[in-house]
Amino acid sequence: MERIENVKQPERALLAAVDTGEYDVEASLAELYELVRSAGAEPCGAMTQKRPSPDTATCVGSGMMEEIASFCKTYEIDLLVFDCELSPTQIRNIESISGVRTIDRTMLILDIFASRAKSSEGKLQVELAQLKYMLPRLGGKGTTLSRLGGGIGTRGPGETKLETDRRHIRRRISKLKEQLEEVEKRRGQMHRRRQKDGVITVALVGYTNAGKSTLMNALTQAGVLAKDMLFATLDPTARALKLPCGKTVMLIDTVGLVRRLPHHLIEAFHSTLEQAATADIILNVCDASSSEAQIHLEVTRSLLAELGCGGRPIIPVLNKCDLVPTLHELPMIGNAVRISAETGRGLDALLESIEENLPVKTTRVELLLPFAQSGLAARLRKDGSVLEEEYTENGLKLTAQVDPTLLHLVQEYVIFPEV
């Protein structure tokens, strides 16, 4: 007999949106499609309706709601995903009419974040965002938390359950905030220690699925998960990166951004995003093959401005250039560096750009070190960049790229500083 294995089929999802003219609905739905796919569901179509404002009862109008219900029944839809934030009443009404489980954009993103967070900090941040989203919605859970009436003697078990849940959630939110404050305090101590030790930090920021993790792996062999999906990695990763000039910097990968990111998540992940605000150099990575590359760069740039990153060098990085047929089709965006993290193309130019924006510049010098100064030669190899070495009868002759600290140590042995 043939063995039959039951393979769980992905949920079939229908996307819905209301076009009020506030944003580009088609672009937002295309992004929602990728979010649904990243969550493990199968998008089976999208329906939009133009309205001056969302309907208070069902978000879309009654006629559109009937069309959605008919589509769900005909094509056996398991999940309705609305490209906006729904109220508990709207969700209950939509589910009652369509007979299909309904979620909104925020719930979808929260679910993705919950499934991807691996570190203890990431899990704390996601839980905090979920509880903040859930708290004002407890009153709309329907008959399971219904109240008997308003007045003395009419308070029923539903009201008691509702108040108990709210108190529990508020206590949990306070506890999570305390734990995250401790995490932020430790991160602040680490940042001050890096500053004291003279460690320069370079932060990778940008739209989700722009290839930040792939770039991190290409530069540092970090082994970070890199997949063609939104929010493949949430937890920040830091790795040492040695530049061609010999200077070692700390490369930090941050959480990806997305259009209309829920404010609950921005608040919860603020401590993670602040790593970009405290970085010495910021790499704004975007997908060059996307028709919205310019918009993605602007979304990131505006968030960085909110975080107070003004005055810091921000290098636009156009990734995935190997997917663009001809280079001249790429958008010209300031001093953008064009690379392909997948193939390694352009990485040398990116490293040169990082060097040019270092807060501490290096100098090329020619030295003649006595043999007794072998320890200083070892220091140059470790913290600088030795370009040429030659043993002579008078000592070790070498050409090196050094920062001001090393230059001060070897000043007396300089025989020909480059002009």
Image (cartoon, helix red, strand yellow):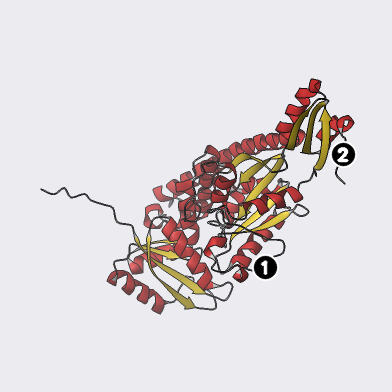
Q: Position of residue 87 (x, y in %)?
A: 48, 62
Could you say whether the residue bearing mark 2 is in a helix, strand or loop?
loop
Tag 2: amino acid: Phe
Q: Give the mark, 2 or 1, whose residue is nearer the N terminus.
A: 1
| Location of mark 2 (residue) | 416
In the image, farthest residue toward the left: 1
Q: Residues within 10 Å of mark 2 (few under 14, many from 20)?
A: few
Rendered position, 266 above or below 369: below
Q: What residue is shown at x 81% (from left), y 33% (from top)?
A: 406
The disc labelled 1 sits on which kind of residue? Answer: Met
Give the residue at the far right of this rendering. Answer: 412
Measure the alpha-carbon separation of dots 2 and 1: 40 Å
Q: Secondary structure at mark 1?
A: loop
Foreground pick, 16 / 403:
403
Residue shown at 29% from the left, 70% from the top: 73
**Where does label 1 land, which residue?**
332
Q: Residues within 10 Å of mark 1 (few under 14, many from 20)?
A: few
Left or right, 189 with respect to 58, comes to right
Closest to the observer: 304 or 322?
Answer: 322
List x then y, in percent, for residue 114: 47, 47
Quarter residue 170 falls in:
top right
The quadrant holding residue 386 is top right
Q: Position of residue 13 (x, y in %)?
A: 37, 64
Tell whether label 1 touches label 2 (CB within 8 Å).
no
Q: Is residue 156 visible?
A: no
- Give the residue at x 61% y 63%: 296
Left or right of 71? Residue 367 is right
Q: Position of residue 297 (x, y in %)?
A: 64, 62
Along the line of sight, the residue nearer the viewer: 269 or 241: 241
Q: Is residue 115 above or below residue 17?
A: above
| Image quadrant where residue 171 sits | top right
Q: Is residue 294 visible?
A: yes
